[in-house]
Image: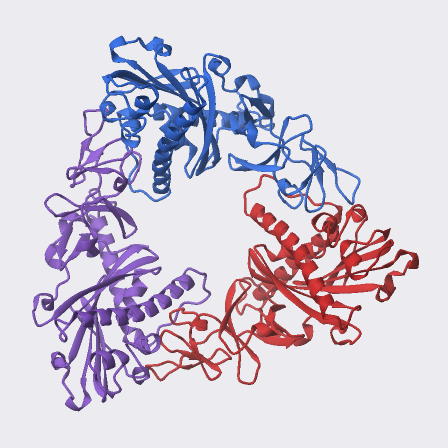
Chain colours: A purple, B red, C blue
């Protein structure tokens, strides 16, 4: 399986990375990460080019890493600065270094061509820095599942009624159609469930007792970031789609890291416009999210096990799959584009056409 | 590895299947089984055709199953009766349904062409319904072993002396030749050990102390049912082969379910003409069978591990292998016949010969 | 992966083999070993040629083994001496027998052509029988590692500074160059670290406090035996290379058994010229060796895991790798020579050239 490489992926929360040499696995590659003396994050291929010992098993010598087998030492750009027993340092004695950037207490890593790594392309939301909103970092959900299935689940409002009947959905939404559109790099699937009983989540946090208008907007930013804008307002107010800030509004953010083809980490957090300084609200919301995400995990891991088995038929697609289908199409196009660029930038063209 | 498909396999004891959605694996396929409101057993492919979630993780809506991911709903014939979010139900939205039949408190399932599923072909023995015989359901032995090796073990009287020296065999039978013949769909291997010490089993249950004539008749019905007719009578009576009912006679029945290529379940029971109403005798016999079957399991699992390893030589066959060899030949012919029929029924012949 | 077959490998310490049927795995092959009534060791292919049950699950009948499934019986030369149920014993009814020889309380096994098995080629050292030296059998280190990496580690003085900083090495040796030469079947890598602080090992056992001259001679005998001659003498004595017996001298011996491609056993022992009758010294040395060998094991198993992963680049080799490179080259040549001999001894040449 191929991954989109020219993209900023979440390597971890900033708090996960300190001065220790720690191994992370991203897109199937082992990477050692640590903070150098100036506090910045270094990310190197976690495998000495000599005898392949993981550098994370070595030790830090200042901001460099000394391999634990024969002492070959690499600086945080991946360059070899010492080979015990010899004075020359050949150019092939290096480890790959990955561009890294911190934003929103998150460490982002670029897994593709270094030249294309532009921090301005890192996912952004103005609410992160807006005092009218509370930002709360949740947790990391580990899933034995391919990241595409995890991401599709996040642009799929229809599953909520069946997978999360006690928390995020209920039967009143089962037959409400889903709209899908695209906004730049994002695919948006959304629906309003007007004038229905509030779901469990808002019974607890909004103290709604009468019927509400409820919305779910699922924004999926390729390749791996999802923002679920959901909330509700009293049905009697009949608010317009663009006035969602007038209701109880929550952005649930999901940053998916493809660890391997069949293992993903979903780091999740939320931003909300109510109970701004109420830390107990954050904890209660976390608890409720944990229930819901465990339900997703159970489903996605069961699906992974089935996908790993032989099949006589191709899966079918139904009306509610429009968001996931657009998503998968875009991912395939991104991978194809990267593959094509690689060929084009090849120094010796395999075929040259003369008119 | 291919399986014989046009055959009735044991899916489970009737008591294993109730109103809950339960997953069974047969011939490598996952099947969800449950009892509908009329008490009959439904057996469906345990994988939603949409996103492949096992239907056994969904929930029952009356006699239908609703998938736990997006609510697609299937009736017990496998037909899709609801797709939330859309009104049309395309023909491709189905799951495979398997013919099922209950007989003798056993659920039988047909894994091949539906048209060929004839309940009259289910294994039958008149003693099941004869009050002169006690029928006792034993247990299910799970083996990390290919079903062919399990079946061959059941048409192989010769192993008894070496594998079950304390229960079913003893040294006096080591060199007694084995006869092999066929009776319709059954392969029969048998031998009489005349005028020898009774084996442990009959010392306990027949209270024999003097020498006995002992018989073992191994009937193996392709593909997966074995009946071991064994018993003894006082040597001084010198009974004829056809008068075995005059002795202490036990039919040990084995219904083998190939779960995967390397995993089998052997559900075993027995029918006997002595101690008819003595439930303690059943329990004692179970206990003794458990010892013997554990001995078989140890041998068969060790063999499976060896068969999974590379080998420089082909295994050899010896005189006592006649029963197993006929069995394997018949299985191969059955598989070949199914494969050939498939080609013959192909709508567009790949090759037509004109004279 | 291919192994060198025409070589004496260590099957086990003599104390590991008794009258019980025990399974050993060497070069990926299962072998049953036991002592016959005259005390000698028999080594047979551990798989009955009939239904493949391991013979180690059978039972001894005198010096023969009777298979636990159908009673086929083999003598300790591998010849079948009984097939229950038939009188003829076909030539194909045999198991392979392996030449075995005991020396130095070690059982050596020959895995190649029987005709080439010459006990005189078993590893030998005069110090084994010299009363001026104490011989002490250590332990068996099991490693989830290919044997080549284990062996290379034993002709690699350079790793000591980095892997064993508290026991066998320290920083003073990091940049001292390594000499490599060959002596017959052995590859020798050595270096002297003159006039430096004693390593932890000799601080404890030699009670050295002032600076010492320290040597490491790593002799690697293809395919699988390593002798590490290491020791030290007071720096003020400035002893010559050939006078190492004047210092505290230890031979650490390693006999590596390739169990499978990715699993090895390193049976280790030592011979020393000090504290000859001091058993507590042996135990203390074992304890220190255990720490060091666990450090090696950690490194080698981490490397194995990396080697099992895909790689975009080939590993690099550096100046200190000369010993390992010569070793690997010789192993490849030995394997190639065995392969070529096989072709030459083929009865029907595939190609004959006529001038």
Instruction: Write the residue at 35% across / 73% down.
Output: A317
Q: Quadrant of the C terminus of chain B?
A: bottom right
Q: Position of residue A238 (x, y in %)?
A: 16, 88
Q: Position of residue C169 (x, y in %)?
A: 29, 26
Regarding residue A194, the answer to whether it shows in the image is yes
User: Seen from this angle, which residue lies furthest bottom?
Assistant: A236
Horizontal placement of A156 versus B7: left or right?
Answer: left
Q: Quadrant of the N terminus of chain B?
A: bottom right
Regarding residue C351, the answer to whether it shows in the image is no
Residue C146, placed above or below residue B183: above
Horizontal placement of B160 versus B147: left or right?
Answer: right
Residue C321, placed above or below residue A148: above
Quarter where residue C181 is shown: top left
From the viewer's side, name the closer residue of A146 and B235.
B235
Quarter where residue C248 is shown: top left
Quarter where residue C212 is shown: top left
From the viewer's side, name the closer residue of B215 and C306.
B215
From the viewer's side, name the closer residue of C266 and B106.
C266
Instruction: Write the residue at 62% across / 40% down.
Output: C56
Q: Position of residue B30 (x, y in %)?
A: 50, 67
Q: Position of residue C94 (x, y in %)?
A: 68, 36
Q: How many marks?
A: 0
Instruction: Write the residue at 38% across / 29% down.
Output: C289
Horizontal placement of A240 versus C167: left or right?
Answer: left
């Amino acid at each position: 399986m191929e991954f989109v490489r020219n993209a900023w992926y979440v390597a971890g929360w900033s708090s996960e990375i300190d001065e220790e040499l720690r191994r992370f696995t991203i897109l199937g590659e082992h990477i050692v990460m640590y903070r150098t003396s100036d506090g910045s994050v270094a990310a190197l291929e976690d495998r000495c080019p000599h005898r392949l010992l993981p550098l994370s098993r070595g030790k830090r010598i200042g901001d460099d890493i000394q391999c634990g087998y024969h002492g070959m030492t690499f600086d945080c750009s991946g360059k070899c600065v010492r080979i015990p027993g010899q004075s020359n340092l050949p150019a092939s004695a290096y480890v790959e270094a990955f561009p890294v950037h911190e934003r929103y207490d998150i460490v982002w890593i670029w897994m593709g061509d270094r030249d294309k790594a532009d921090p301005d392309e890192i996912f952004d939301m103005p609410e992160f820095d807006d005092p009218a909103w509370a930002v709360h970092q949740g947790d990391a959900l580990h899933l034995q599942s391919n990241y595409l299935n995890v991401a599709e689940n996040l642009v799929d409002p229809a599953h909520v009624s069946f997978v999360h009947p006690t928390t995020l959905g209920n039967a009143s939404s089962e037959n409400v159609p889903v709209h899908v559109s695209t906004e730049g790099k994002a695919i948006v699937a959304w629906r309003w469930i007007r004038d229905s009983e509030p779901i469990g989540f808002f019974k607890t946090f909004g103290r709604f007792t009468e019927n509400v208008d409820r919305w779910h907007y699922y924004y999926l930013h390729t390749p791996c970031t999802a923002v679920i804008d959901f909330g509700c307002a009293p049905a009697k107010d009949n608010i317009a789609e663009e006035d969602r800030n007038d209701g109880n509004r929550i952005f649930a953010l999901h940053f998916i890291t493809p660890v391997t083809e069949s293992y993903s980490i979903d780091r999740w957090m939320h931003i909300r416009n109510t109970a701004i300084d109420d830390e107990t609200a954050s904890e209660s919301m976390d608890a409720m999210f944990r229930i819901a995400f465990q339900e997703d995990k159970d489903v996605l891991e069961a699906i992974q096990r089935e996908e790993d088995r032989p099949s006589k038929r191709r899966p079918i697609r139904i009306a509610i799959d429009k968001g996931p289908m657009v998503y998968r199409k875009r991912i395939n196009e991104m991978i194809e584009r990267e593959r094509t660029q690689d060929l084009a930038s090849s120094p010796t063209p395999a075929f040259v056409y003369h008119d």
